[in-house]
Image: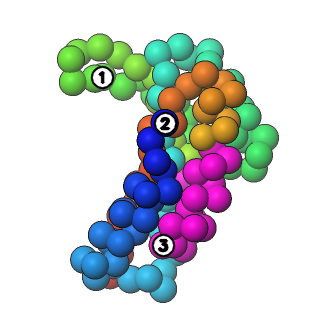
Amino acid sequence: MENWQEISEEIVESLLEDGSNPEKLYEVEHHFVCEDFDKLEEAALAAFKLGYDVEEPAELELEDGGKIWGFDIVVEAELNAEVIMEDVNKLVAVAVQAGVEYDGWGTYFQD
């Protein structure tokens, strides 16, 4: 498993170094993917039961032309790795339990 703590710290540091505003709330998008729609749906339902706002699943095309299912969870959070990691830890556990892949998180620069 990837080291989500290290990755999260790097993302936050990069945004702050580029001048992103640390005082704003950020829309943090957590990504889930799986080839099996039923497993993905199970993960979405589990996250919903934990109180997360789950976006509609969509079929995504991979670079090699293959298809995979995915959905996002969007959470408003401070641009702080520890705060974001609270959600990452919960959502990775959901992914593992459902047999899907937690594909990381991202957010956008804010002035």
Look at 69% across and 27% down and name the residue there: 97
User: Mark 1 sits on what residue?
Assistant: 61
Q: Which mark is residue 1?
A: 2
**Is any part of residue 36 visible from this angle?**
yes
User: At x 36% / y 25%, what residue is drawn?
Assistant: 60
Q: Is residue 43 above or below residue 76?
A: above
* Residue extending furthest toward the left: 64
Check the image and report above or below for 67 versus 89: above
Instruction: Specify the quadrant that holds the C terminus.
Output: bottom left
Q: Is residue 98 magenta?
A: no
Give, as a three-letter code, the residue at label 2. Answer: Met
Image location of residue 93, percent across then percent down: 66, 38
Numbered badge on residue 79:
3
23 left or right of 67? right
Magenta-highlighted stretch: main secondary structure? helix
Q: Amino acid at mark 1?
A: Glu
Residue 46 in the image: state x and y as whole percent: 73, 34
Q: Residues within 10 Å of mark 2 (few under 14, many from 20)?
A: few
Give the spatial CA distance, label 3 vs label 2: 23 Å
Q: Say few, some or many: other residues with alpha carbon within 10 Å of mark 1 (under 14 / 14 to 19 / 20 or more).
A: few
User: What percent of the width, then of the height, locates residue 62?
Assistant: 28, 23
Mark before the other along the chain sequence, 3 or 1: 1
x%, y% of residue 11?
36, 62
Drawn side of residue 49 relative to residue 16, left or right: right
Instruction: Give the residues in magenta.
Output: 74-91
Nearest to N terminus: mark 3 or mark 2:
2
Q: Label for residue 93? A: none
Q: Does residue 77 belong to the magenta stretch? A: yes
Residues tagged 1 and 2 counted as in contact (Cβ below 8 A): no
